[in-house]
Structures are given as structure tokens and as C-alpha cells.
Image (spheres, grey):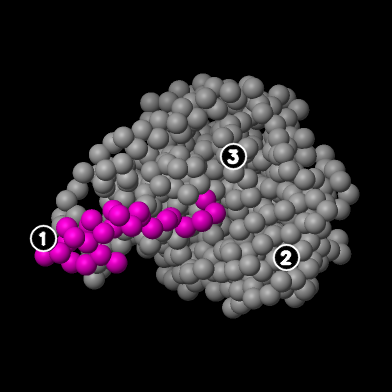
Amino acid sequence: MAHAQQHTQSLWQEHTAFPALKSLDTSLKTDVCIVGAGIAGLLTAYRLMRKGLDVVILEKDLLGFNETAHSTAHLSNALDDGYVNIRKWHGREGARLAYNSHTAAIDLIEHLVKEEDIQCDFQRVPGYLFLGEGDDRRFLEMEMAAVHDAGFFDAHLVEEAEEQFFDAGACLKFPRQAQIDPLKFARGICENILARGAQIYPLTHAEKFQGGEDTYVETSSGHRISCKHIVVTTNVPINDWMKVHFKEAAYRTYVVALKVPRGMKAPCLFWDTEMPYHFLRFHTNSKEDYDVLIVGGEDHRVGQGGTSDNRFFRLRDWAERRLQIEGEVVASWSGQIIEPMDGLAYIGRNPGDFDNVYISTGDSGHGITHGAIASMILSDLITVGSHPWAALYNPSRFNWKGVSRFIKENIQTGIQYRDWISKGDNKDLEELIPGQGCVISEGLSKIAVYRGEDGMFHRLSAKCPHMGGVVHWNEAEGTWDCPVHGSRFNKYGEVLNGPALNNMSPEDRSSEEATERKNKKEGSVGVK
């Protein structure tokens, strides 16, 4: 399968190279087959190997091109949904376990950085929750009470952040948060497990999963990995058609990295209470004479947020207006956020499957810490059969206290099927500029048309191969995005993000022939 690269590139990808490894070209046997080489997959492999198990990791893309690469790597036990909500959804004891598990995740990463000597810019820093414009201070007071109830007694209200570099006003301060270069850390773990004997195969697309007595993962090229356990850590579980997907929703989040003077402020994290919200951190590259302020947020449902270019503009505008910063943009990118119905990831045995098939999904903007939590839970479930946090993160749970969020998201999901009766983008293809795409209607068919830089049209069925939603064109990243369950594809239809397993299909031949006749009649460029 070809490497399906996107337009935008994160700050971390510019300077981090992974070991050059070959794709899988044979069948083999192992103890555990892990699908997905992000933080969750790599750390789970590390812990399993420390327990004496053999591990094979499959990654559909090149190493360093998964969602870990798009993280801003805030390592935080101050959860995005807030402890008021976490306590409402999971109760007082659940909120305490959530706090304890994310605290342990940061501690685990810090321990590994020191023990394995991983050079990844790990720093303990304070984090601050500040009010969005027009929001009420009582929100911070209520959140502080819930945070204390969860056991985070060091968090407290301050009238002004010590590290404040803009007029943030009153903040809820969370000591001992952390930040990291996520790809340098992932590369360090990758090199470590390779040295321990792990087998990692990039550009290897897992396509079929079978648990039980005859457990195996089969790739798109027909090679089979026979194993005792399967672990799927692919952001969304590509081995599951629907059981988990209806309990979570896919969002895009956006990031701009701005040049700022070296040493402008000590490293720190900031989040606001706006909807959609914003988050900040600093990054120092020793090879440059400036620091970088990373500004993120402006999240929206995949395929439902209007123009992505506008989201980058809105981040720059917010930074100028709220922070009084107009630094040069040195990088901009976006990432995929999977929101569960009740604020916490789904980690454990795959619902309705054999007991030796496991998943990790629904990171809710905390991919690094949830990945570390997954490594602790999954490695223990595989080796000893239990873990103290397993019930809290159980993928089979249906939390009735989060049902209003569940209903809201699934209504949004269902509404997207109306695209089948819409007129598409209603564009004249001759007006489509090279490098852009659109969806057109031809009879009962929806066609995804991309015009290459050479002027040639590339036509595909606009039907998402997962559950039949109509894809939308994402102009900022040059991708086709499905607004139903968040599957994404590059401009030629190669799958980038699940839950879709397969590439977009060619259009119906009858529709293609009709377009060829139309092109010849109008003297248009050819169809490819």
C-alpha cells in the first residue's frame, strides 16, 4: 500500500527520523500482534517485552506519520472535559481513578525517559485553566471543588499565573503537568523495543482480524501473523465495524506554531474554557535562536467544520487578539481527536469479541497519557488477566449518565446521510483549480473529483467504504473526510484514518464513460 501523506506537517516531523524498516513480506508467528505504532502501541509493546513476551507491530504508514506525530503533547491530569463532568459521568470514585491513572501515566513517561535515557525534551511544567471571554469565574470555583474531590489537592485558584505572558486573569493552576516532543519519545521507545527483539513493520496494512483458538491478523498483501493475542491501537479500532464507533465521535483539531523571542516565558501549559477551546505551550529548539509558541484548538466534527483554512486563520486571529502575539508561523497542522461519550478512553477487551482481542480508542485529546494508561492496562490484562483501572476504561461500558452527549453526537452522525439527496458541491469541473477537489452528483451517484496539478481529473465514488457516508473535500489538507464516523482518505482515495479499512472505490464505469464523452465533447482535459 502506498504511503498516504497529508499536506500539513507538524513541528515534530521536521526534525525526527525513525529507523528505516521494511514492510512485512512473509507470514510469521508471535505472542502478541499489535496493530498501530503510535504511543499506545509502542508503550504496550515495551511493557509486554519487559514481561517476556514476543511482539510484532504492524503500522499502515511510515513510522512517524500517525496521530502521535500530530499531538501537541500536553501531558496532563487536568482532563479536557473537566472533573465536574468526569464526576457526574463516573462518580466520585471514578473521578479519583481517572486522576490517579493520568497522574501515573505522566510518572511512567518520566520514569522511562530517565531509565532509558530518551532525549525528548521532557519537562515538568505548571498548567493553567483560564476563562474564555465572557465566561464566569464560578466555573473555575466549581471545577476546583471537583478537582479536590478527585484527590488533586495541589490544584488551586490564582488571581494571575506566575508564568503569565498575556492578560489571562484568574486561573486554576495545576502543578506538575508535563510537556514532551512526542516523536522523539516515540522514536526512543521504538529503538528500545527493536533492541529487545521486537519486529516492527511499517507500510503494512492489517485487514482481517480473528481471535479465539486460531488467532491471527492478516494483511492486505495476504501475509498472516499467527499469535496468542491481538491489540489494536489505531486511534479508532479498525477491527470493529460499529460496536464502539457509535459511542464516540471524530473531531479535527488545529495547531499553529508561532515564532516568539527566546526565553519570553518559562515553559507552561494553558487551556481556556471557550467552545471550541484553545490551548497553549512553548517549545524550545536548541538549534534555533527563537522559541515557538504552539497555539491549538478550534475543534470541529470531521467533515462538518466548513473550510479548514479558516480554522488556521481563526487560531492566528485569536493569538493576535487574545495574546497580543503576531509571530511568524513556522508550522501548522491538524490532528484527529476521538471523543468518547463520557470523557474517558475505551481500553480493554474488544466488545462482543474473543477475550484475546483488545483495543484502545477514545483518547479525548489526551492521546499521550491515555496511551500510557493503555500500556499499563493491556499488558496486565494479557499477562495476569486483570488491572485495577480496567472497569473504569472498559470498552463494553455504556454510560447512561453520558446519554445526552451520546444522543447529540449520533443525531449529528445520522444527519450526515442527507448528503445523498443533496446536489453535492454544485461546481463546474472546469472551474475546479488544480490541487482541489469537490463532490458532484451524477444521477443517483456521488462522485469525488480531484483535479491534479497537471490538470487531470481523478474520479472516485464519494461513498465512504465504512458505512456509506458521503465524503467531503478538506482543502487545507488535501483529503477526503467522511462526516459520519471520521474516516479520512488522501486525494487519491487511500485511507488515512479509520474506521474505514479499505480505500475509496472507483466510480461506476457507466458514470466514468459518460464523463469521458462529456470531456471529449467540450474539449476538456482527460480523465484519469
Residue 107 position in % (x across, y down): 73, 51
State the residue lying farthest toward the left: 522
Tell me the kind of residue under disc 1. Answer: Glu
Whether the residues at callouts 2 and 1 have beta carbons within 8 Å, the answer is no
The magenta-colored residue range is: 500-528
Residue that numbered label 2 is attached to? 225
Q: Earlier in the sequence, mark 3 or mark 1?
A: 3
Q: Dividing the picture into quarters, in which one does residue 97 lie?
A: top right
Q: Is there any visible trace of residue 456 in the rendered image?
A: yes
Residue that numbered label 1 is attached to? 522
- Foreground label between 3 and 1: 1
SS at mark 2 in the image: strand
Q: Residue at x 88, y 49 (%)?
A: 384
Residue that numbered label 3 is attached to? 242
- Compared to residue 87, the image places residue 485 above or below, namely below
* Closer to us: 232 or 292: 232
